[in-house]
Image (cartoon, rainbow, N blue to C red):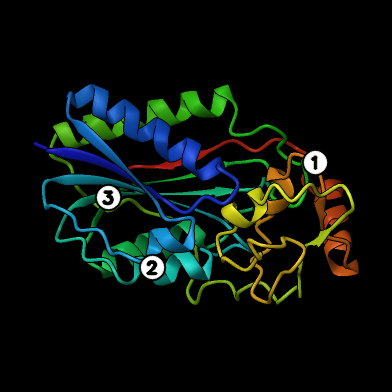
């Protein structure tokens, strides 16, 4: 019997958070047990390593960047000790492809002592553009996430704990080439500092959010979260990639679930 359900996620634009929260909430309600949320998005949230109980079920979520788990999230996951706790690996991608990210996350969790019993690849609005998978995960996606949770509930109830067959290749897809991204700030900025507070790498100056140091993930948390639309990217590489996405990735893709 599981004693607690934990949702743990890295989610700069909140899409992964929505999926993990839906699965966690559904399972907690089904079992009538407590749940907790571990948000790893901000630098301060990654300063302490959480502990886990062997009787815990952990829903782990990460976005997909260039077909891989973001390095900052992967490096944190490598520090964990799963202690044999069951885990569900989930990734959220921007309607292009999740490539090897779900396999990578599954094997990473297994390597630090979790027992992965299910995996899911969900779709979220692409971080580079609001035109690709706009508004996702939507109600349909969240319904699928809840159904997935109930399937996990049933699998554990039957004491089936096999590792599901997750698609992907070895070696994993090469990490996306550095785009040299650095967000810019327009005169519309009112220095509300929301971008600085929400930056997962902590590279935006809290005193003057126009000052940004190297190390940008290109997650677009600052762009999508700015109430004045004052943050933006305008590099030629970024604009070309965004156009490519908008041209080739508009057809809706559905979540893929792996339990057996």
Numbered circle sitting on residue 193 = none
Judging by the rendered image, the residue that carries numbered circle 2 is: 76
In the displayed structure image, the side of residue 152 where residue 105 appears, left or right: right
Q: Nearer the viewer, residue 14 or 91?
A: 14
Considering the image in quadrants, where does the N terminus appear?
Answer: top left
Q: Percent position (x, y) of residue 250?
A: 78, 40
At mark 1, the secondary structure is loop
The residue singled out by tag 1 in the image is 228
Number of dots carrying numbers: 3
User: Of marks 2 and 1, which one's residue comes earlier in the chain?
Assistant: 2
Mark 3 and mark 1 in contact? Answer it, CB < 8 Å.
no
Taking the spot 59% from the left edge, 35% from the top edge, the residue there is 254
Q: Nearer the viewer, mark 3 or mark 1?
A: 1
Looking at the image, which residue is at 17% across and 42% down?
A: 160
Give the label, 2 or 3, closer to the camera: 2
Element assignment for label 2 = helix
- The residue located at (50%, 77%) in the rendering is 171
Label 1 environment density (alpha carbons within 10 Å; few <14, some 14–19, many ≥20): some
Front-lying residue, 162 or 26: 26
Q: Quadrant of residue 209?
A: bottom right
Compared with 43, 146 (above or below) is above
Q: Return the residue at label 3.
A: 87
CB atoms of marks 2 and 3 within 8 Å: no
Side of 116 relative to 137 (left or right): left
The CA distance from mark 2 to mark 1 is 32 Å
């Amino acid at each position: 019997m599981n004693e607690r359900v934990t949702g743990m996620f890295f989610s700069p634009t909140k899409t992964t958070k929505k999926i993990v929260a839906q699965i966690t909430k559904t399972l907690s309600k089904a079992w009538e047990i407590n749940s907790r949320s571990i948000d790893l998005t901000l630098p301060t949230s990654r300063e302490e390593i959480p502990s886990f109980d062997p009787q815990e079920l952990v829903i782990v979520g990460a976005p997909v960047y260039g077909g891989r788990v973001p390095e900052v999230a992967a490096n944190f996951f490598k520090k964990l000790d799963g202690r044999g706790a069951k885990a569900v690996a989930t990734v959220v991608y921007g309607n292009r492809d999740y490539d090897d990210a779900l396999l990578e996350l599954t094997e990473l969790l297994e390597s630090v002592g979790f027992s992965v019993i299910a995996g899911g690849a969900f779709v979220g609005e692409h971080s580079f553009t609001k035109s690709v998978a706009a508004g996702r995960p939507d109600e349909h996606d969240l319904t699928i996430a809840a159904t997935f949770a109930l399937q996990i509930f049933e699998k554990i109830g039957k004491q089936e704990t096999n590792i599901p067959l997750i698609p992907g290749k070895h070696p994993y897809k090469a990490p996306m080439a550095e785009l040299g991204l650095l967000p810019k700030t327009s005169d519309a900025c009112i220095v509300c500092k929301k971008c600085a507070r929400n930056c997962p790498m902590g590279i935006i100056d809290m005193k003057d959010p126009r000052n940004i140091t190297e190390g940008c993930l290109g997650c677009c948390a600052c762009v999508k979260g700015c109430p004045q639309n004052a943050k933006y990217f305008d590099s030629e590489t970024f604009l070309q990639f965004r156009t490519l996405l908008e041209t080739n990735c508009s057809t809706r893709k559905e979540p893929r679930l792996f339990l057996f």
